Amino acid sequence: MALDSVLARIDADLPQATERLLELLRIPSISTDPAYDAECARAADWLVADLRSIGFDAEKRPTPGHPMVVAHGDGPGPHLMFYGHYDVQPVDPLNLWNRDPFDPALEETPAGTVIRGRGSSDDKGQLMTFVEACRAWKAVHGSLPAKISFFFEGEEESGSPSLIPFMRENAQELRADVALICDTGLFGDNTPAIVTMLRGLLGEELTITGPSKDLHSGMYGGAAMNPIRVLARIIAALHDSTGRVTVPGFYDGVPELPEDIAAQWQALGFDHKDFLGEVGLSEPAGEQGRSALEMIWSRPTCEVNGIIGGYTGKGFKTVLPSQASAKISFRLVGTQDPAKIRESFRAYVTSMLPPDCKVEFHGHGASPAGQMSIDLPAFEKARAALSDEWPNPAAYVGCGGSIPIAGYFKDVLGTDAMLIGFGKDDDAIHSPNEKYDLKSFHKGIRSWARILDALTK
């Protein structure tokens, strides 16, 4: 069979594929630090050269920030667009790494062989799974099974400021029948997953001001309003006794989980005690009557991410502060409107202010949730192909985090996105000693070959 020949080629070429990944990982493409601008450009050049070596028409495209890499390869059937990002997170704190973050190596661990280095899982290792699948297909058949395009960006880890303008300016070129994104993970070690729900994100920072300056608590305590006390009361009121968010209109647009998806999640055998136990907790703290998987995949949240106020240095200072502030984030689902929630939250906070206090707000981004249309035939074809490669059947899952690119493909290009990744929860992405399981890398390449075969039949 044609697919069997491709899979055999992938198996035989794994050492060479691994070495290519190690070569890319040696490039310190940290997008958020201007000191590494040249390295980001070098990573883009590396990808262009590698894609050209397997017959793609690849180019490095300039942006006001780091360059994009766009490549096209002709073939019959549907047009598939593959997205990934070549930039990586900073490595601080460096002293917590067991080796140079940009001197990657294979390392034997009790759980098997891993590729250790910054970007190994997020996202260089993941994007190379698809590149290697195309390489093996071309080596066996001399041509691609479909029209395949690549779209790699270099600013994902720094907010993607150039992404939407670039997509709009090049919309006709970037449109495809389906977009494939490899920046997610497995469920456990042996269950592949297709992410169909992505939570949106809204960030708010509020600063409450009371007295015009810090005061002596002995001279003014009791008579003067304390902004920390006001802030604490507002924060405490954001949730009721059942864990529901109290901001008016917050649950507008929040859907119930479809029964078939709920059944798939139940079959995953998720144990919240194990999940929480790894971080020293035991009981879910969200909405009562919801499972832990629902809480992190399909329910909205309001979380306090930081509080500042008064004297926080060593020792003690009996100060009554002039200001107190908090950073609060909302994870959004369904059709919740970030703009409306921001407006409602600000009105809610303002309504709780006592006399002599005022509040200032500062927004920190707003993006809606993403919902993938699993009615498209490509989704079931991909799920079946993944199930053929892995020990457990593939499942449609949610993602507690936010991956805006999926929504941008739909909103800007009109292209539905399919999120399939092969990372693991313990890969330590964004943290010291990031790794990528060699088995995941290998089976990820094989998985994409199976998916290409399924989508082009």
Image (cartoon, helix red, strand yellow):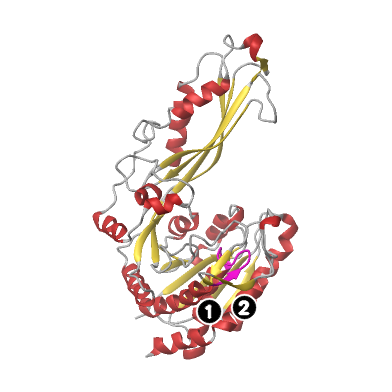
Cα separation between marks 2 and 1? 10 Å
What residue type is disc 2 on? Arg
Asked if disc 2 and disc 1 are in contact, CB closer than 8 Å, the reply is yes
> Is residue 347 visible to the viewer in this orientation of the structure?
no
Q: Position of residue 96 (x, y in %)?
A: 67, 56
Residue 132: which numbered mark, if any? 1
Name the residue nearer the viewer: 457 or 23: 23
Q: Position of residue 127 (x, y in %)?
A: 54, 70
Q: Is residue 118 magenta?
A: yes
**Residue identified by numbered label 2:** 20
Q: Residue furthest left?
A: 259
Q: Position of residue 181 (x, y in %)?
A: 47, 65
Please report whichever mark, 2 or 1, sits nearer to the chain's N-terminal start.
Answer: 2
Q: Which part of the image, by quadrant, shows the N terminus?
A: bottom left
SS type, badge 2: helix
Which residue is located at x 69 percent, y 66 percent? 102
Which residue is located at x 64 percent, y 73 percent? 105
Direction from residue 243 to residue 423 in the image, left or right = right
Direction from residue 76 to residue 49 in the image, left or right = right
Name the residue nearer the viewer: 67 or 157: 157
Which residue is located at x 31 percent, y 58 percent? 265
Circle 2 packing at 10 Å, graded few (<14), some (14-19), many (20+), is some
What residue type is disc 1 on? Glu
Q: Position of residue 168 (x, y in %)?
A: 53, 58
Within the image, what quadrant is residue 224 found in? Answer: top right
Direction from residue 220 to residue 405 in the image, left or right = left
Q: Residue furthest front?
A: 110
Within the image, what quadrant is residue 164 found in? Answer: bottom right
| Segment tinted magenta in the rendering | 113-124
